[in-house]
Image (spheres, helix red, strand yellow):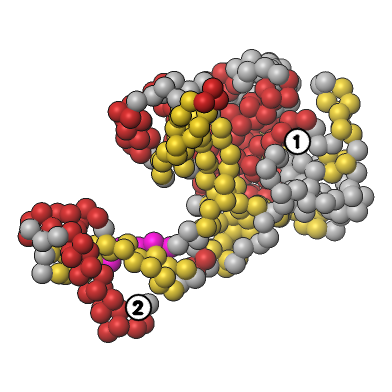
Amino acid sequence: MRIAYFDCFSGASGDMILGACISAGVDAEALRGDLTALNVPGFTLEARPIRKQGFAATQIEVVVDPVVDKPHRHLSHIRQIIEQSQLSAPVRERALAIFTRLAEAEAAVHGTTIEKVHFHEVGALDAIVDIVGASLALERLGIERVLCSPIPTGSGTVTCDHGVMPVPAPATAELLKGVPLAACDEVGELTTPTGAAILTTLASDFGTLPPMRVERIGIGAGRRDGQKRANILRLFVGELNAADEDEEDEILVLEANLDDVSGQVIGHVYDALFEIGALDVFTTPVHMKKNRPGTQLTVLAPLHLRDEVETILFAETTTFGIRAYRCSRRKLTREFETVDTPAGSIRLKVGRRHGKVVTAAPEYEDCRRAAAATGRPLKEIMEQAIRLWRAAQDEHPGSK
């Protein structure tokens, strides 16, 4: 699996992220061509090598034509620009997810809705280019998974459109909820709202450098000069070690309490949620207020499916609220193997941890069909399949 690991020892901003991607090998001229798919005129993307407190880095700048109108945009305006662009579907989805997360943070800070959020710095053309450019750059690098270090925010105050604010700025603090922060005595705003939105939307986990084979290292430069550390962001690009691939990720857990929904409706909701790609759906009996028995419906889903899951739950159930939180998940690497039995071919799901087989289970549907075709009990089919699979493992120990 090809991964990108952002080492934010001196914070992160949108231009630092994009600069690191270009430094790691993304062709700046090709990226300029990609950005024309936005169909937004009046800007030029410049990338130049720079020495930042002794380190060679890439600094980018979005130069806006002074005669071009610079409106304050709402999320609907940005969504329209991206949806009507010629960008690829994955890039559009990635960029929209970042902007939506940013709008949710701004809405929470200002006590309004995401559609009423009036973007200031974030709605400016340079921020749009940073976010869409980062999405394009990661696609050009072939990144399948983004990981990130704990994030330092800096200290002191920052001046913005709303006046002087403490660091981290309110929107940045909202975006970093649930994310491990790094201690840092550097004065100033190290992590901006745009940088926090990009990393917290795209990164599936935050921690130390993972076991990987590093192929490229990119360094993006920020605008400030640090007093105790260089204002740069490092990006490691490479392959995750095979033994650790896919063994840990981050998912979304969504919960709703129901006290007036029938079993038939809940069954229908199960089908709808699995249809859109939910990882798991289950119910738990609960005792609710006013001494009423109820059901807690829990959905496990990939991070990008939050809106789709919530749409189904609000439309198909009577809930007025949905709890949602991110959850770190460790899992076995899974693959399918097939054994030939007297009842036919049966697939088994084999789970490995650090390359070693730790469990195997016959596929229910294969066993059910074999039982129906032969008239034999289901449990006998399943037992025979696992017995034959284990015998094959004993004959070929190297496959364990």
Magenta highlight on residue 334:
yes
- Residue at x 39% of width, y 24% of height: 261
Q: Which residues are magenta?
A: 333-337
Position of 213 compared to 60: left or right? left
Q: Secondary structure at mark 2?
A: helix
**Residue 344 drawn at (x, y percent):** 12, 64
* Residue at image coords 14%, 60%: 377
Q: Percent x, y for residue 235?
A: 66, 55
Which SS class for mark 1?
Answer: helix
In reply to whether residue 196 is colored magenta, the answer given is no
Residue 198 visible here: yes
Badge number at residue 64:
none
Q: Is residue 269 left or right of residue 223?
A: left
- Measured in 3D between alpha carbons, the distance from the residue under mark 2 to the one under mark 1, in whole angstroms, is 48 Å
Q: Which residue is mark 2?
A: 399
How many other residues sit within 10 Å of disc 1, few (<14), some (14-19) or many (≥20)? some
Write the residue at 80% across / 32% down: 169
Residue type, label 2? Ser
- Choose the circle earlier in sequence order: 2 or 1: 1
Q: Amino acid at mark 1?
A: Ala
Marker disc for residue 173: 1
User: In which image quadrant can residue 396 be found?
Assistant: bottom left
